[in-house]
Image (cartoon, rainbow, N blue to C red):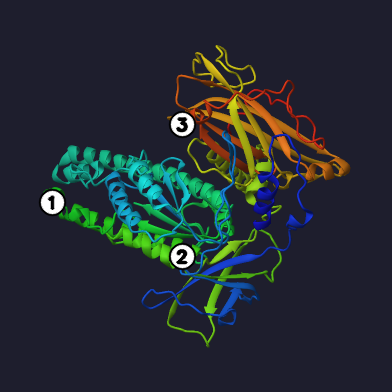
Amino acid sequence: MVHRRCLFVLAFVSCAAFGQTQTPSPEATLQAGTQLVIVDVVVQDKGGQPVHGLKASDFQLTEGKAPQVIHSFDEHTATSAPAKSEPPLKLPPGTCTDYTPVKPNETLNVLLLDALNTPTKDQVFVREQLQKYVKNAPAGTHLAIFGLTTHLTLLQGFTSDPEILKDAVEHKLVPRNSVLLDDPTGANANPESLSDQLSDEAESASGALATSLAQVAANLADFEARMASFQTMLRVQYTLDAFNALAHYLGAFQGRKNLIWFSGSFPITILPDPDAKGSPFAGVDSKSDEFQQTSALLSRAQVAVYPVDARGLMVNPAFDVSSAGSSSRNPRAFATQLNKFTNSQADEHSTMSELANDTGGHAFYNTNGLADAVARAIAAGSNYYTLSYVPSDRRQDGSFRSIHVALGPSAPQAVTLSYRRGYFAYDARHTSAAKSAAASPPATAAAGSPANAAQQSALLHAASAYANAAMAHGGPTPQDILFKVRVAPAIKGTELEILPSNQPDPSLRFIGPFRRYAIDYVTLPQDLVTTLQPDGKRTGTVEFLALLYDADGKLLNAAGKTVELRLTPETYTRFMHSSVNLHLDISVPTRKETYLRLAIHDVSSNHFGVVELPAASVANLPVVSVPTAPSTPPPAAPAPSTPPAGAASPPR
């Protein structure tokens, strides 16, 4: 990753104009080798304080039951002298990039406010606690803030500027109602369900009325259970998709990331439970392959999850004053409500602890000090040891490999170790789940065995979910493919008609005037995947996309081109020593607040590079000259072809 990002900076900083080819230094190319497993280990004493000064010889590491040789060892401390930051790229007006300069191996922190799984009043409480935290956050703390509804939204990119963080928490953490979560904490809420109320009435009735009420209560209870199960299933899927998108985004940065997840419920775990009967993913059998892919991505991205119960210190609602009357009249209902709450809490806390333990984090619940929880999570995640090893089992068959880390007899023993408990042995270069899913058409799954079909279906969903997240307005901007793009007006005035090459939403009535914008992309071929064919040629497919959204996230218009690579050995060599350039035009209505989300998508690997900017930010730039002929990639690649209708639209 260091070599890749340095190559991007060296090649693009000096690029004065689009369309120029660059020749990267051969020494800057990182050669792929044997899979290296990285394990971050937090070591704390009984008081929760970090233990410093340990050596590699103090650690004993096994995979399964096989001892492993530690390949590299580093200690990271919060008090270490900060590494020299990469200088920000100086780009002219209208030119932007998905490249984010951060300090090498700096610990990054992510705050995730989960509105999907959290009652509104608890979101308000979290916001108040975060306002308290950012006012006193240690200098230099690098934070990004995300929100989750039915999709993931980047509210604030990584920054250590306290004023920017205060502004983000104050104005961007807006509490939202969850469309899939019943809020049982309102002032007029009754902890008894309607089916329970009918059951109570059936007990006090007699004869045919009692039988009828009991039957209705049973049917209603079944309906309520099915509805709750369906809503939970959707929340699991949306949450899993969000973690998948986060893992893709965070994988572009080196070093450890602490993901602090504020939620009112935690419907997923990441790693399997080896003691569970049947599927190791209890209750989510159909999604186990997606869990494996997400787990693999989180592992490679060095993400430790710190779940924080946004509800704070909870009291059983059965003891709430508003429900005291009904509970006192019906002791059975009171006991049922009491047991339901106790069991639910135990399940929630168990899931939180499992998720934290599996990824090397820590769970926080039954506390109103959420600001303190954030401070403790960041402090713990900033003092750790990084161990790496080459597995003695070289097979990359997708199986789960458990990891165990302990301290030797010469090291302190009264300590707690936090680290990820395993990983899935996927080859990230060639056989990753995302790549396989992206490359396999749905027909392949349908033709296979039921088990393979289910697996392919799950992986295809994970791939399409990532594609949707990558292109959604306001979402995280992946950096799988590093690129820069220039956006500027292509004409002085306006036009009454939309460009014929554009693909507007057919359900909208587009009325001019429109402003035409020129979009020029440039990237390096090192991030693009080509496949060697039997005839010696290399093939690949790259999409260049420009999507226009309104302020509410509705897709208004799209433009795109697809480049089909067919490279001989000679042209492949030239291609790898050139830059890839492409031009698009898009029509933007002048009477709306709009946003351009621009992307390069490598179809073979399902990798994205994405930037987003308000159209208003480039509206007053000087007009750029528009090419008289369609732009082309370097001589090594054929001219791009315009995709058929719908091909440039975001994956749905």
- Is there a contact, CB below 8 Å, between mark 3 and mark 1? no
Examine the image and state in which quarter residue 138 appears.
Answer: bottom left
Q: Relative to 135, is 484 above or below?
A: above
Quick one: 77 or 10, which is closer to the camera?
10
Cα–Cα span, label 3 and label 1: 42 Å
Residue at numbered disc 3 = 553
The residue drawn where x is 43% and y is 29% is 551
Callout in the foreground (2, 1): 2
Quick one: 219 or 601, which is closer to the camera?
601
Task: Compare marks 2 and 1 and give the one earlier in the sequence.
Answer: 1
Q: Position of residue 208 (x, y in %)?
A: 19, 37
Residue at numbered disc 2 = 381
Q: Position of residue 463 (x, y in %)?
A: 60, 43
Q: Amino acid at mark 2?
A: Gly
Q: Relative to 321, is 230 above or below?
A: above
Residue at numbered disc 1 = 321
Q: Quadrant of the C terminus?
A: top right
Task: Compare marks 3 and 1 and give the one earlier in the sequence.
Answer: 1
State whether residue 265 appears in this view. Answer: no
Instruction: Count the numbered circles shown.
Output: 3
Q: Position of residue 590 (x, y in %)?
A: 49, 19
Q: Position of residue 219 (x, y in %)?
A: 31, 40
Q: Amino acid at mark 1?
A: Val
- Is there a contact, CB below 8 Å, between mark 2 and mark 3? no
Cα–Cα span, label 2 and label 3: 35 Å
Label 1 crowd bin: few (<14), some (14–19), many (20+), radius 10 Å: few
Q: Relative to 335, is 409 above or below?
A: below
SS state under label 2:
helix
SS state under label 3:
loop
Label 3 crowd bin: few (<14), some (14–19), many (20+), radius 10 Å: few
SS state under label 1:
helix
